[in-house]
Image (tube, grey):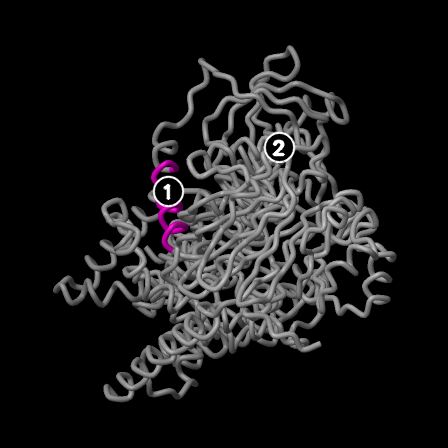
């Protein structure tokens, strides 16, 4: 049993390693070579099956090549779009995802069906920026005239690669749009209905609360991609709290941690309680539209919850490894997603570093300690990577997160149970029911603005890739050394 | 240990509630006019005692919704009057979202048409509340009123900008939309009572508005320029010079952010 899981760990690590290595090579290999390498290592494994050591080495080589293959397959060819770059084109397509409402524009992801006169069958999509009104919805058929543009690579940000994660390889700015009906394209009816429910709820929240509380709360509870006012958004960044404004693994694990005692109180024992919790998280993820970032949040949240509730960091750690593998299998390009890495490192910190912090933090007030421990662990583990990605570190990150995080969870808890009933409530009653959340969020916004507006504390500090790796090496060494001590 | 936790929770609750209610009572419910920093555009929120709110224009995007949200009392989701000076994008787009979220009483417009897609949406949402402003459509409230001094109906939408005066407790603010000098001259020649304590400078400080004569006729003690990043050279050097020559203090939203003026106005010139 023990040995089997050992092999799975090696397989997963090899797979992830292969993807990592390939991501540094900007080249699409001929499949012939990769296929043969895969075959060769497979044959070698069989030949050396008897020798345990060599077998393990060959096994990891096999999975490294397998990771290589997965990444290689994931590189989209994008053969057709380049023919149209910088040309005026007519596209017929459908809105393929929930529209993103920015403060000054709508962004739509379009799945083209026809470009010019040619029928288009590829997976590639187009990102389109248009006026705030009229509002478009998932599944709308559109006829679009625009100057087609290639996503750019900026000095400090590879926009093209970022978009490629969502299969977007073309841009249209402020096109002429007319609605058109498209018959033979099937949209996902379930997603369509869920998005309708979601937009209904967002509308209700917006009608009952003022900005910026409304956008904030809609983001926390139904995963709205509303436009949070820019200054506030900057202050979130300056205080290292951007992770709370969306449905993140963080919020989910916190919510779970607060719901678990309720389930225990209903005389469920540990295991069933945890499974019920997983079910609730699953429903929640579906309910908010099951976008890829929300699914990730659901997975990471469940893992962290498991680690927090049971303290079995080795099991949770292994589960984290498997989840990363699964996510890479589905889309290997998330390797370029900063959010993915932040979320992985935060979860890793939660799982492995929490027991250490827990031991050294001497605080008597239980609810305070319960939030402090994971906060500190996650922040320490995300520090190097956020410095590498964003080029800044925030001195306020720790104190601000400590002040606000516990309360964010309460704001969500006071709101979630209300949502299904919003349909029945008149405006006045809605405002009273939202009051507890509003009072909490009002305070949080003030704290964030207070620290965000401080002239210092948000320091430019960009470390390069290798320093980041070295830092992680150090942190990991320290963590496992302490954990070993702990166990002994 | 249990006790400590209880005290902790009670302290937090008290802190939140006091923070919230202090803000609501001592800031949000006070009478004032807030010239919102909406970037390049106009968006003004006016709150009067007895829960009367007036919005003047709506800025070029949804930034204005944030400003309104920051200033409305928590339980107040009704905006009594909305005045859109003219249908240019930098004056009304944010008002569309306001119409979607809030219960708006009456919407005054210049009556000019525009085929901008956002304006069509605006007209659709405001349908039953629309009123094309006329000289008779004065808005009255306790201790004050709004007087329309110049109305729409011109070819050029800037010429059609509604010009009106908010009079409250004997003090006044003049709003001039994007009206150019020739409209200003017409007003001076018509012997209208232009005197005001505060002037919302016309057309974001454009060189085509705010003549010296006009400033003399108004003689405000404070001028407010609602302006953001732009390629038009707003506010122009000439307008700034005119203000300085006339010894009028001025404030800019691009430098100061939202500018709040307590009502009734205290002239501390």
Residues packed near mark 1 inside 10 Å, few (<14), some (14 to 19) or many (20 plus): some
Q: Is residue A484 left or right of residue A111?
A: left
Residue A148 position within the rendered picture, expressed as x and y whole percent measured from the top left:
71, 27
In the drawing, what numbered circle is on residue A208?
Answer: none
Task: Please indicate, yes or no, whether residue A7 appears anywhere in the rendered image.
Answer: no
For the point 48% across and 58% down, which residue is it? B69
Q: Is residue A260 above or below residue B185?
A: below
Q: Nearer the viewer, residue A227 or A280?
A: A227
Chain of the residue displaying label 2: B
Q: Which residues are magenta?
A: A195-208
Q: Is residue A12 left or right of residue B115?
A: left
- SS at badge 2: loop
- Give the residue number, with chain letter if any, for mark 1: A198
Classified by dominant secondary structure, the portion drawn in magenta counts as helix
Confirm whether the magenta stretch covers residue A203.
yes
- The one of A429 and A400 positioned closer to us in this rendering: A429
**Is residue A330 a member of the stretch shown in magenta?**
no
- Label 2 belongs to which residue? B112
Which image quarter holds the N terminus of chain A?
bottom left
Query: Would you identify the image quadrant in which residue A326 lies?
Result: top left
């Amino acid at each position: 049993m023990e040995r089997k899981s050992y092999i799975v760990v090696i397989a997963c690590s090899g797979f992830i390693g292969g993807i990592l290595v390939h991501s540094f090579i900007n080249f699409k290999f001929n499949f012939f070579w990769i296929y043969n390498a895969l075959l060769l290592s497979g044959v070698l494994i069989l030949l050396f099956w008897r020798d345990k050591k060599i077998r393990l080495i060959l096994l990891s080589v096999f999975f490294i090549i397998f990771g290589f293959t997965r990444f290689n397959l994931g590189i989209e060819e994008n053969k057709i779009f380049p023919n149209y770059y910088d040309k005026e084109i007519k596209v017929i397509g459908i809105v393929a995802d929930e529209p993103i409402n920015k403060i000054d524009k709508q962004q739509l992801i379009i799945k083209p069906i026809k470009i010019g006169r040619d029928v288009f069958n590829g997976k590639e999509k187009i990102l389109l920026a248009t006026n705030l009104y009229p509002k478009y919805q998932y599944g709308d058929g559109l006829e679009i005239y625009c100057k087609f543009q290639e996503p750019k690579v900026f000095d400090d940000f590879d926009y093209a690669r970022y978009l490629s994660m969502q299969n977007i390889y073309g841009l249209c700015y402020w096109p002429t749009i007319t609605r058109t009906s498209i018959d033979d394209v099937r949209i996902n009816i379930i997603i369509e209905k869920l998005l309708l429910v979601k937009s209904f709820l967002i509308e209700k929240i917006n009608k009952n609360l003022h900005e910026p509380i409304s956008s904030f709360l809609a983001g926390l509870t139904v995963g709205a991609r509303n436009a949070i006012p820019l200054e506030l958004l900057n202050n979130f960044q300056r205080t290292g709290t951007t992770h709370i404004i969306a449905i993140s693994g963080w919020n989910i694990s916190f919510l779970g941690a607060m719901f678990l005692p309720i389930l225990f109180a209903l005389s469920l024992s540990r295991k069933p309680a945890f499974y019920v919790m997983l079910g609730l998280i699953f429903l929640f993820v579906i309910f908010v539209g099951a976008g890829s970032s929300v699914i990730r949040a659901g997975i990471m949240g469940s893992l962290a919850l498991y680690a927090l509730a049971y303290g079995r960091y080795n099991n949770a750690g292994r589960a984290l490894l498997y989840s990363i593998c699964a996510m890479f299998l589905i889309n290997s390009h998330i390797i370029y997603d900063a959010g993915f890495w932040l979320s992985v490192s935060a979860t890793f910190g939660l799982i492995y570093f929490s027991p250490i912090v827990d031991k050294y933090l001497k605080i008597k007030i239980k609810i305070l300690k319960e939030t402090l421990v994971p906060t500190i662990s996650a922040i320490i583990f995300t520090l190097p990577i956020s410095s590498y990605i964003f080029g800044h570190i925030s001195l306020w990150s720790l104190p601000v997160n400590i002040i606000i995080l516990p309360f964010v969870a309460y704001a969500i808890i006071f709101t979630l149970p209300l949502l299904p009933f919003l349909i029945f409530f008149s405006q006045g009653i809605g405002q009273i029911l939202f009051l507890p959340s509003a009072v909490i969020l009002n305070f949080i916004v003030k704290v964030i603005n207070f620290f965000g507006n401080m002239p210092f504390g948000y320091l430019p500090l960009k470390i390069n890739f290798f320093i980041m790796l070295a830092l992680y090496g150090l942190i990991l060494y320290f963590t496992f050394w302490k954990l070993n001590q702990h166990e002994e | 240990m249990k006790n400590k936790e209880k005290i902790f929770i009670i302290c937090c609750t008290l802190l939140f509630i006091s923070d919230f209610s202090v803000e609501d009572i001592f800031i949000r419910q006070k009478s004032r006019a807030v010239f919102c920093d909406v970037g390049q555009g106009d968006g003004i929120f006016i709150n009067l005692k007895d829960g009367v709110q007036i919005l003047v224009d709506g800025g070029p995007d949804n930034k204005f919704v944030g400003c309104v949200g920051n200033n409305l009392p928590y339980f107040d989701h009704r905006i009594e009057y909305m005045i859109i000076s003219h249908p240019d994008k930098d004056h009304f787009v944010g008002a569309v979202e306001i119409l979607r979220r809030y219960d708006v009483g009456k919407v005054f417009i210049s009556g000019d048409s525009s085929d901008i897609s956002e304006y069509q949406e605006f007209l659709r949402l405001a349908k039953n509340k629309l009123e094309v402003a006329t000289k008779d459509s004065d808005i009255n409230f306790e201790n004050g009123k709004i007087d329309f001094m110049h109305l729409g109906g011109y070819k050029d939408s800037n010429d059609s900008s509604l010009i009106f005066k908010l009079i409250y407790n004997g003090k006044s603010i003049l709003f001039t939309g994007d009206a150019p000098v020739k409209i200003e001259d017409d007003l001076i020649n018509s012997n209208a009572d232009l005197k005001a304590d505060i002037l919302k400078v016309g057309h974001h400080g454009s060189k085509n508005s705010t003549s010296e004569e006009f400033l003399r006729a108004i003689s405000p003690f404070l001028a407010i320029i609602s302006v953001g990043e732009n390629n038009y050279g707003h506010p122009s050097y000439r307008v700034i010079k005119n203000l300085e020559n006339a010894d009028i203090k001025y404030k800019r939203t691009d430098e100061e952010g939202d500018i709040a003026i307590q009502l009734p106005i205290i002239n501390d010139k």
